[in-house]
Image: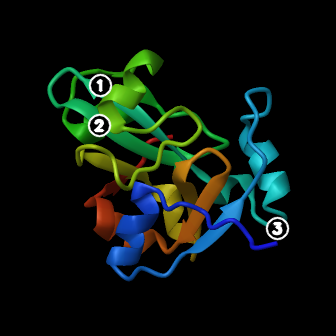
Amino acid sequence: MAKKKESKTNALRIVEQQKIPYTLYHYTWSEDAVSANHVADQLHEKKEAQIFKTLLFVGNVTGPIVAVIPSNQEADLKKLAKLSGNKKVELLHLTELEKTTGYIRGGCSPVGMKKQFPTYLDSSVEIWDEMIVSAGRRGIQMGLAPQALIRLTKAFVGTIV
């Protein structure tokens, strides 16, 4: 029986169009197990700190902004606000996520959103040769060089956690 071909996400199409090398990782996604530890366990030798999550915030000056931080950490709102030129930032309400980005919770990639928002990447990424982010759908992640993601998203790097 022929193997079913996996459909590409916006994130994967863009990475491939830009000829950026990446590794695709699959994991079992469930509403009950969304922790970084759960994903890291399934990605075998990958560390939680190497897996980055994509969070959407709204700044009082800039509007929506993207923060990419280690999945085992929490964003420091004051640091993110200062880095992004805002007085304050707050998490984008979950009900607004798909309408704003085109992605759903658990599958939000910093690449391929409906619109390119200002993107901020935590400086802890600098210790990795490969960082892992959502590939745009629940259950798949992509590993790529941090410099490639910075270039692709025009990200600013700074301390966010």
Who is closer to the viewer here, 153 or 60?
Answer: 153
Marks 3 and 2, how far apart at CA = 31 Å
Report crowding for label 2: few under 14, some 14 to 19, many 20 or more residues within 10 A (C-alpha). Answer: many
- Callout 1, which amino acid? Val
Q: Which residue is mark 2?
A: 65
- Callout 3, which amino acid? Glu
In contact (CB < 8 Å): disc 1 and disc 2: yes
Q: Any mark on residue 58, and which?
A: 1
| Left or right: 79 as drawn, with respect to 68 | left
Q: Residue at x 41, y 75 (%)?
A: 16
SS at mark 1? strand
- Which callout, 3 or 2, points at the residue further toward the start of the chain? 3
Q: Any mark on residue 150, and which?
A: none
Tell me where residue 121 appears, x and y as whole percent.
Answer: 40, 52
- Callout 2, which amino acid? Ile
SS at mark 3? loop
Q: Residue at x 75, y 49 (%)?
A: 39
The quarter of the displayed image where residue 47 is located: bottom right
Q: Which residue is mark 3?
A: 45
Viewer can see residue 78: no
Marks 3 and 1, how far apart at CA = 34 Å
- Which callout, 3 or 1, points at the residue further toward the start of the chain? 3
SS at mark 2? strand
Marks 1 and 2, how far apart at CA = 6 Å
